[in-house]
Image (tube, helix red, strand yellow):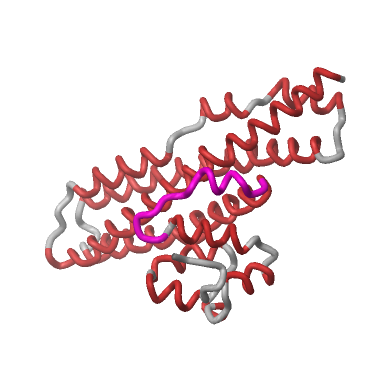
Amino acid sequence: MITKNNTFTEIISQNKSLSSVLERFGVGERDYQKTIEEAGKALNTDPEFMVEIITAFDEDNKPDQKVLMKFPIETILNYLKKSHRYYLDKKIPEIEISLQDIIRRSNQGNAVLFALGNLFIAYKRKLTEHIESEEKELFPYIEFLIGQLRGDFDYKISQKIISRFSIQKFEDSHSNVEEDIEKTRNTIMKYSPVKTFAMSYRIFLNQLELFEKDLHRHSIIEDEVLVPKAQRLEELLKAMVERS
């Protein structure tokens, strides 16, 4: 059981894959001797929240929706933003490099590999659009709700914004990238590479599988924690507008 008294060295020694989760909090190897509580204070992040997220990514665990609902919506939102940056700036580029290595090893002459490469590029484009739509529309709207309910209430502005946008409408029109990565990986798995670059191909598939699991946990936190909390704020603001 992971607690806020564990050092990151202890955590990583049990599960090396958790280093990717620590990165999102800004924890690097230089911090591994610190406990979660020490790092949390230094990073201005709730240590208990860090424990819950690290635990959610440990082995076959999943995020505990009931526990995460207890944390402030700002904490959830900030974590999801950091996850987006991790996906776009590090994880996807790493997977791309592996794919390029496979293509290079095939002497640029395998049409099937090029087709698989194009399939992954199409998925990358869709994921990027998915994340950008959240960061340009959903997240700013949630920040607006928070601001209006915590002292900055403006009747005219609130009425205007909530008449044009709703979380439910956004969710209904939002693409499901979790299903997309599963379909992409399943399609790519059907291809059997020649022995000369079979190892590189297995590494690539393993990266896709880990990313799929990571994205699944991300979706749970977003859909089952952030969205319900944000909808409560939306209902409160609508009630305030109606009273005004």
Between residue 121 and residue 154, name the one nearer to us.
Answer: 154
Q: Residue at x 25, y 44 (%)?
A: 186
User: For the N terminus, which image quadrant?
Assistant: bottom left
Q: Can you give x and y, in whole percent of width and height, for residue 113 in the image?
A: 24, 52
The residue depicted at 62 percent of the width and 43 percent of the height is 135
Residue at the limit of the structure toward the top, as seen here: 242
Counting from the top left corner in percent of width and height, residue 77 is at 63, 48
Q: Choose between 91 and 162: the one closer to the eye.
A: 162
Q: Relative to residue 231, is residue 12 drawn left or right? A: left
Q: Is residue 227 above or below residue 42?
A: above
Q: Is residue 33 left or right of residue 188?
A: right
* Residue 110 % position (x, y): 20, 54
| Residue nearer the viewer, 118 or 202 | 202
The secondary structure that most of the magenta stretch takes on is loop
Magenta-colored stretch includes residue 120? no
Q: Is 65 included in the stretch rendered in magenta?
A: yes
**Who's the residue at 31% across and 43% down the image?**
184
Classify 28 as above or below 166: below
Image mark count: 0
Residue span colored magenta? 58-72
| Residue at (42, 53) in percent of width and height | 214
**Corner quadrant of residue 183:** top left
* Quarter that holds the C terminus: top right
Q: Is residue 157 left or right of residue 31?
A: right
The quadrant where residue 16 appears: bottom left
Say which quarter of the image contains residue 31.
Answer: bottom right
Direction left: furthest residue: 195
